[in-house]
Image (cartoon, rainbow, N blue to C red):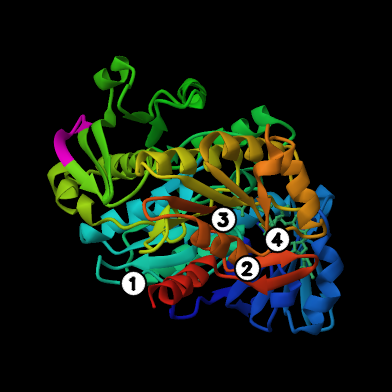
Amino acid sequence: MVVSAFVQSTRALMAKFGVDAPDIRICGLTLDSREVTTRLAFVAVKGHALDGRDFIPQAISLGAKVILAQTEDKSEHGHLEMRGSSVIISLYDLPDMVSSLAAAFYDYPAQKMSTIAVTGTNGKTSVVQLATQLKSMLGTRSGAIGTLGHGLYEGKETEYTPEPDGTTTPDPIRIQYILAEFVQLDAGQAAFEASSHAIVQGRISQVKTDIAVFTNLSRDHLDYHANMDEYAQAKRQLLKQAGLHTVVLNAQDPESQNWKKFADRKLNIIWTGVNEVDPQITSESHCIATNVRYHAEGCSFTLQSSWGSAEVSIPLFGTFNIYNTLSAVAALLAQGERFDEIIKVIGNVHPVPGRMEIFPFNQSGNVVVDYAHTPDALEKVLTSAKQHTQGDIWCVFGCGGDRDKGKRPLMGQVAELNASHIIITTDNSRSEKPAAIAEEIKQGLTRPEKAVFEADREKAIRYCLSKSKPGDLIVVAGKGHEDYQIIGNNRTDYNEREVIARLQQEYSK
Ligand SMILES: CC(=O)N[C@H]1[C@@H](OP(=O)(O)OP(=O)(O)OC[C@H]2O[C@@H](n3ccc(=O)[nH]c3=O)[C@H](O)[C@@H]2O)O[C@H](CO)[C@@H](O)[C@@H]1O[C@H](C)C(=O)N[C@@H](C)C(=O)N[C@H](CCC(=O)O)C(=O)O
């Protein structure tokens, strides 16, 4: 995205925080000394693994004129130190201030648009993309921020080409910068994924949020959060976002009741659900799908809501995509978009790249690419695939090295229960041996001898293409839209969607 530069005086910026600073013009802030240029101020904070203050000399050598440095001593707040021609400004509680600093630097961009924050273990990316697609089809230029990166939708004809950010929710400075870019490009809405890491680390604490969406909760990230309760609580902190007026909750996830319990009474709640919903929710604000049918082109259902009812068809696979669509629709209805206008465009939504994305093959089973890398997500993908075919399900997946080992046998168990054929492969094995990870996955299988191990992902897919028959579905899970594979310390290029598109060409000859 090309936008005009942001410039501010450190004096004006620091004055907003009660600090008297010299008048130096800066064009941005960065938390990473390696990104420093003469025009950026370096924000030096202590992190989980490293202390940013140790990189102040590097920042100065790269030309930083201004360094904002964390101090644990309250009396040092606002203290100025000159090092050569660079000034170091000590700030107490700087880690908690970063989001406010960035919001102030970029002139509070979230306050200039409608904002939707989406949290939950699964579905965040799809809800963000669907809310963005729908809003742009309704005529408002809209931005999306999340696992795919960030970018603008400008209508259904425009190809969405996000710029990668590395994390699901960008750091507290970068997210304000991206929002400011969206404002400069006349976006009227920003939808962003709020990961539990981001919420507890305060990356979005000063991003004004109108609507929060909670999709669901299942086991994930227990290498970071001590237990499921802490993980759930982290997500629920989204209820404290400034500006929040509506929360969209999945009536069929038990954790939603905790959200309701902890939600401010003034908040509007919109319930989503599919088929057998508790009749109670239809007496409250709701957006549900009934009479669901699955077919080769997607799903059809009756969209029943407090704003109206209509028959709709969406070109998306799986019940979870119906939930995702309902969440996106509910968020737009909460903004005041008209039900009948949404119904006119809903059939034009398209799958998120790498999320239950179908690649047809004539001589073998079709391939379904999905990002699923948790037991719950894998189960959802496999059960959804089964709904759309009478043939065999082939499941290609692996588990990450140096991460939550507890999920490995659980993923194996889920695959065995829901697929006819299991092929275990590599999924960012990092410092571990792929074969050793495969053995741990097999511990969840009752018949481990039936699972095939093929460390090379492309060869694993080729194996399924050679053995499957038309009508089968080959579910390739774990990578989705990602374009890399981490083995040992090497991050190599690997784009599964491109590999499969190439195999489609090869197999069509
Ligand atoms: C463990 C974790 O969450 N770390 C996040 C945290 O970093 P940190 O402050 O602890 O970093 P650190 O490595 O200790 O370094 C301390 C400071 O020194 C700075 N530094 C470091 C090295 C250097 O050469 N120069 C330098 O200035 C760093 O920029 C940092 O400011 O704060 C940073 C700024 O917000 C995040 O970018 C960073 O995310 C790292 C990259 C990460 O991989 N996080 C993952 C676990 C994550 O956030 N995942 C979630 C969920 C994904 C999902 O749902 O699947 C996400 O939102 O992506």
Q: Which mark is residue 159?
A: 1
> How far is the residue under mark 4 from the one under mark 1?
34 Å
- Helix, strand or loop under label 3: loop
| Residue at the image point whose x is 43% and y is 52% from the top | 356
- Report if the CB atoms under discs 3 and 1 are less than 8 Å apart: no
Residue denoted by label 2: 484
User: Given the image, on which type of amino acid does mark 4 rest?
Assistant: Ala
Across the whole image, how many numbered discs are drawn on residues?
4
> How far is the residue under mark 4 from the one under mark 2?
15 Å
Placement of the C terminus among the 4 image quadrants = bottom left
Q: Earlier in the sequence, mark 1 or mark 2?
A: 1
> How far is the residue under mark 3 from the one under mark 2?
16 Å
Q: Splitting the image into 4 quarters, where does residue 392 fall?
A: top left
Q: Splitting the image into 4 quarters, where does residue 137 fall?
A: bottom left
Magenta-highlighted residues: 304-311
Question: Is the shortest distance between ligand 1 and the CB of mark 1 under 8 Å?
Answer: no
User: Given the image, on which type of amino acid does mark 2 rest?
Assistant: Tyr
Crowding at label 1, few (<14), some or many (≥20) Cα neighbours within 10 Å?
few
Residue denoted by label 4: 455
Q: Earlier in the sequence, mark 4 or mark 2?
A: 4
| Residue 227 locus on image (x, y percent) | 71, 31
User: Given the image, on which type of amino acid does mark 3 rest?
Assistant: Thr
Q: Earlier in the sequence, mark 3 or mark 4?
A: 3
